[in-house]
Amino acid sequence: MEIKVIKDILQRNEFSADNIRKLAKENKWFLINVMGSPGAGKTSFIKAMINTFKDRFNLAVIEGDVASTIDAEEISKLGVEVLQINTGGACHLVADSINEALLSLNLKKATVVFIENIGNLICPSSFDLGENMRVVVSSVAEGDDKPYKYPIMFESSDVVVLSKIDVVEIIGFDMEKYIKGLKAIKGDNLKLFGVSFKTLEGLTELESYFSELFNSYFNRK
């Protein structure tokens, strides 16, 4: 008796992710997978990046949500290309959907594409989207124990943005504990930016980092 085995979903996803990498390289796109819990500040991070760089670089956004177009509508007001992906219940985006979205957007060459993943600290970390880098947005309001509880998410990310630092004292957030947890995971590779998208504290350092990153990527031969 022959037993048929369905191809592993991660293997299929990796195949699509590799295709995205090829497409991005050919067109010099820079894809950023933005992950984090619901309400952590993913959309606020993307909006801040748009406001800073929309006059200097080509920008586009792929907005992932279980349902609704609320965030996509907000981002579209900033004058950049945006495409909504609704997963209908799935807790993460997949490379197949991103590949389709990139083709649907009809992007210019040399474009920064922000991909806002589904609000979740578990599932998105396991699915490669063919991105150039991963950013996890973690908020003070979530607590200082998140690196300890969700190490894979933080380990798989290139940059950690800690948002809502204006309420550190109100929440009783232990910054030393939080950083210690991150360093245990990332070591010397830790890139942490503490910001408040409300008071704008820390945004200069964050924007300076991405400015240097984008300039280096788009100006290289």
Image (cartoon, rainbow, N blue to C red):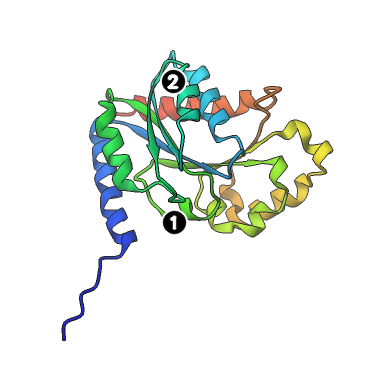
- Identify residue type, mark 2: Ser
Image location (x, y in percent) of residue 60: 38, 26
Measure how far apart labels 1 and 2 are at the Cα level.
29 Å
Please provide percent x and percent y for residue 94: 36, 48
Q: Residues within 10 Å of mark 2 (few under 14, many from 20)?
A: some
Q: In the rendered image of this protein, does residue 80 appear above or below residue 176?
A: above
Relative vertical location of residue 189 with respect to residue 208 in this rendering, above or below? below
Residue indicated by mark 2: 76
In this view, the residue in front, 145 or 24, is: 145
Which residue type does callout 1 highlight? Answer: Ser
- At x 27%, y 22%, the residue is 108
Residue highlighted by disc 1: 126
Q: Describe residue 26's horizontal placement relative to residue 98 as left or right.
A: left
First along the sequence among labels 1 and 2? 2
Residue drawn at point x = 24 percent, y = 42 percent: 22
Rendering coords of residue 7 (x, y %): 25, 65
Q: Quadrant of residue 30?
A: top left
